Structures are given as C-alpha cells and as structure tokens.
Image (spheres, grey):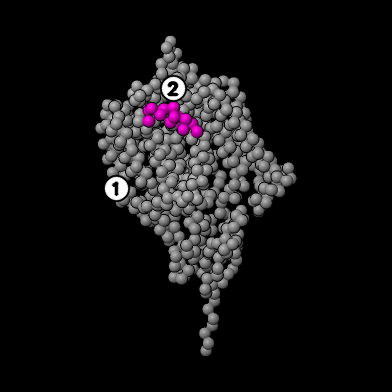
Amino acid sequence: MNAKNAPIPALVSSDAARRLPRAALLLLCAAYVLPGVFGRDPWKNADLAAFGQMLAMAEGRTSWLLPTLGGVPTHAAPLPNWLGAAFIMLTQPWLDPALAVRIPFALLLALALIALWYGCFALARTEAAQPLPFAFGGEAAGVDYARAISDASILALVATLGLLQLGHETTPELAQLAAVAAAQWALAVAPYHPQRARIGIVLSLPVLACSGAPMIAAVLGVAGAAICARSTYDGVQRFGWWVAAATLLACAAAWLLGQWAWRITPPTPQQWPSITRQWLWFLWPSWLLALWALWRWRRFLSRRHVAIPLSVLVTALVANLTMGGSDRALMLGLPGIAVLAAFALPTLNRSTSSAIDWFSVFFFSLLALWVWVIYIAMQSGVPARTAAHVSKLIPGFVPHFAWLPLIVATLATAAWLWLVRWRTARHRAAIWRSLVLPAGGVVLSWTLAMTLWLQPLDYARSYRPHVALLSKHIRPGVCIAAPDLPRALTAALEYYGRWRVDARPDAGIRSECPIWVKAGTIARPPTTPEGWQLIAIERRPTDKDEVTGVYRRAALPAARP
C-alpha cells in the first residue's frame, strides 16, 4: 500500500485539539529562556571561550575578520561573534559585558522556539498529516489540530534534556540552532507562503554556514531540494530551485569567510557505548516519541510532515557521529525531533500518557525536593551532613542569602504543584497532555538551579575564584606569556584579571612578558621553563585536578669584571 492510499494513523476529536492557553505557553517559554541570563559569570569551557572572543573584538584587541584570542587565531564562526561583540559595544557602559552578550543569544533561543511553532503548524496543516474524519462527525478542525500539534512541539523541545545548558550559552551553536529551526520553517511554509519561504531559506542556510556549520547547511539544502522536487503542492517544486540557490550561496559565503574546515573524526568501537548513552539522555524524552511516530507514520516517510523534520534529525545524528560524538552537533537535530515527537501524540493510548505523567510527577518532584534540601543545608547548616558534603564539593564557597532568588524559586515550586493538580484534574483529552508535565518539570528544575543553586554553580563553573588566587602573584596590568594555554583560561585571564595575554606557541621565548602562566594537572603538574623561576602553583578551587603554574623571569647573573 502506498502512502497516498495508506490510512492516516491520527484519530483526533475536536475536544482533543484544544490549544494550550496562550498565557501558559508564553509563561512557560519565558521561564525556560530567561533563567541563566542574569546574575552569573561565563562558565567554562566553550561559554567562556566564546565570550572572551567577543569581548576581544568589542574592545578592539583583535580583528573582526581574522579573530584571535591571546594572539592565537581561533577561526571562530563570524556571525555569532559579530552579534555578541556588537551587543557589548551597544550596551556599554550600562551593562556588564557578560550580561550584554547573553541578551542576543537569549533572543536566538526565543527565535528557535517561534520558528519551531510556525514550522510545525504548517506541516500539521498538510493533507497527509490531518486526522481521519469520524463517521458521524466530531473530528478536529484542521487549524485547531495544527495548533495543538504545534503547542506540543514546543513542549517537546523544552522537555529535551540536552538543550538545557547548551541552549543557555553564548556559543555559535545557539545561532546554528536558530538557523536550523528557521530553515525547517521555510521548507514547511513553502506551500502556503512562498514569498516568506524564499526569504527564510535564503537567509537561514547562509547564516547557518557562517555560524560554523557549512557542511550541515549544505546537507540540509540538498535534502530540502530533494523533498521539494517530490512535492505535489503547486509551486513547491519551483521553490526547490530557491533552496538550491540558497545552498550554493551558503557554501560560497562560508568559503569567503574561511569556514570550511574538515572535522571528521569517526567514532572508534570503544566510543559507541558512550555515544549511545549520549543519545539516550540528550534526546530524552523526545526520542521515545519520535521512534513511535516513525513507526505509526511509517507509510508517510516521504510526505512533508515526516520527511522535513526527519531530514533535520538524520543530518544532526550523522554529524554527531562524524564528529566523534559532539553534543553540539546533536543539538541541531532538536527542531526535527520535536516535530516528530509532536506527531506521535495523536497516536498514543491513554495508558502510555498516564505512565509519562506519573513518571514526570515523581521524578521532578523528588528532584525539586532535593534542590530545596541542599539549599536549606547551605543556608542554615541543617541537615549537618548535607551541609558538610556541599562544603567538601565546593571548598572556599561562602553562601549569601538573597530574597529575590528565594521568592522566584518559591513561586516556581508553587506553579509546579498547581500544574500537577491542573493536569491531573483537567485537559485529559488534549493532544499535548503527555508533554505538559515533562516540559514543566524541566522548567522547574532549570529555574530552581538558576535561583537556589546559582551561587554555588557560578562559583564552581566560573574561573573568577581561580583568577583571584592567581592575582595574588601577578601585578595588575602586567603582560603574561601563556603559550598554548586553553582558550577558556586565556579568556578568563583577560576578562577577570585584565592582563594582556600572549598565548602564541613561541610566547615564552620571543615575548618580553615578565610572567609565564602554564596549565597542568595534579598528575602532570606544569614544569618550570628554562630561564624562569616558579612563583606559585594554584589549584582551581572546585576542580580536583586542574592546576596553574605562575613563573617569573630569572634574574641574569651579574657579568664578571
């Protein structure tokens, strides 16, 4: 049986196609995007390194076309770095650079959510995606069904565990995620809004390529053109030529900006178990629903509502494998897997939905309780054993009480309790019911972490305490030779210490800097370079292994008369 004659697996009543209340959906998205934007430092490693690059560009310490960090070329993705550097310049001196740079990236995350919703809405309106009509009426209206599926796609993305930290960093991958979501939207709306689709695809693929992912842009472009070539919708085949042109434009733009770089490192047999575990937790819980969707819609794999998100997901999975299990490549498949997960919901039975609900209630409630117990132990010392364990994990950290985080965390916990009661008492027929509690639980966990635990997390993930220890041995404003120093530590020395860092490989020999800084570990501590004297070796307070050595030039012996 071909897809054209295959029975559609979705049976949806008008009551099940009710939309999620707009205020609740917007509040959920805001509670997901905003925590983590305020009140913290850039965290190691990629977040701090990317911020240090943008700060160097904003302060004029490096070229915008050929950026360097500590004098070392980084080959950084241009567009995201230009965006962050521009916001730093526009908001000075009113905002701290670390806060200013997070604003555009929070907007990029919001853009990804918006593009996902409208793209899923367009896909759910296609003829092959619409639910079967009932014999005696009462089936869902097409627009209502599409709106409910789109609401579910947002919940699926928010509930995905892998996006939590990576989605709140200032790294190029967040710009890539927004571009992938925009490209998926452009392919989805081509039958209905051809002019918008052309603009969207011509912008999204070059932006993706110039954000550090030219190969993914090329593969998505080829896949999108192939899908358009097989389409039966009027004008979509002609739109395929626009997709092809956008792909060529993306490749050319990446070539002009020097973004083509092969990073293929196929996984070894020993890496396969870890990559499998990565897929299981990173894509949880959407991968379960996506697999079910592919099975139930298996006769429709060539239709737009399955083919477009599936091409996005497969591209990211292949990129993840060819890059040795890169979680940042895997993140680009989230818009696709969120749409597939949403299309699984109309085919789930009630017992499966109930199992998801009860698992979410118990898991996230226990997690929230654990966060509150540790917070109370940090603030009051009770229970003493928990407080002692926290002090052991974060040596040197002194908690400070603040009302605002406590109020926000209390409101978030109360909202979770209300959500559990609301979900179990009402909306049992809604399509999106199975993802309300998983998405709400993730938002609750992230909000509690970014309020009650923000101080210890910031102390543990920031380089500020480590640089404070190093500053005891290095004068302000001095030049530091730091050959081959990790990018994150280079950025930390320049931002927190305001030192001028020369990280070129020959900096220790050719540089006239009076101080040399070397990174090492407890097992392999840094060695004293010839002609230099050891001042101190400082261990990073919250890392059991990371140490940094500080050296000064040895005094030359006096010449004999």
- The local crowd at label 1, few if under 14, some if 14 to 19, many if 20 or more residues have their Cα within 10 Å, is some
- Place of residue 430 in the rendered image (x, y in percent of width and height, measured from the top left): 50, 22
Residue 127, can we see it? Answer: no
- What's drawn in magenta, residue-wise? 288-301
Residue 444, can we see it? Answer: yes
Q: CA distance from mark 2 to mark 1?
A: 43 Å
Quick check: 192 left or right of 370? Answer: left
Q: Nearer the viewer, mark 2 or mark 1?
A: 2
The N terminus - image quarter = top left
Q: Residue at x 30, y 51 (%)?
A: 256
Q: Residue at x 52, y 23 (%)?
A: 349
- Place of residue 407 in the rendered image (x, y in percent of width and height, measured from the top left): 63, 35
Q: Residue at x 49, y 41 (%)?
A: 279
- Residue 468 in which image quadrant: bottom right
Q: Is residue 104 magenta?
A: no
Q: Secondary structure at mark 2?
A: loop
Q: Secondary structure at mark 1?
A: helix
Which residue position holds label 2? 10
- Residue 451 in which image quadrant: top right
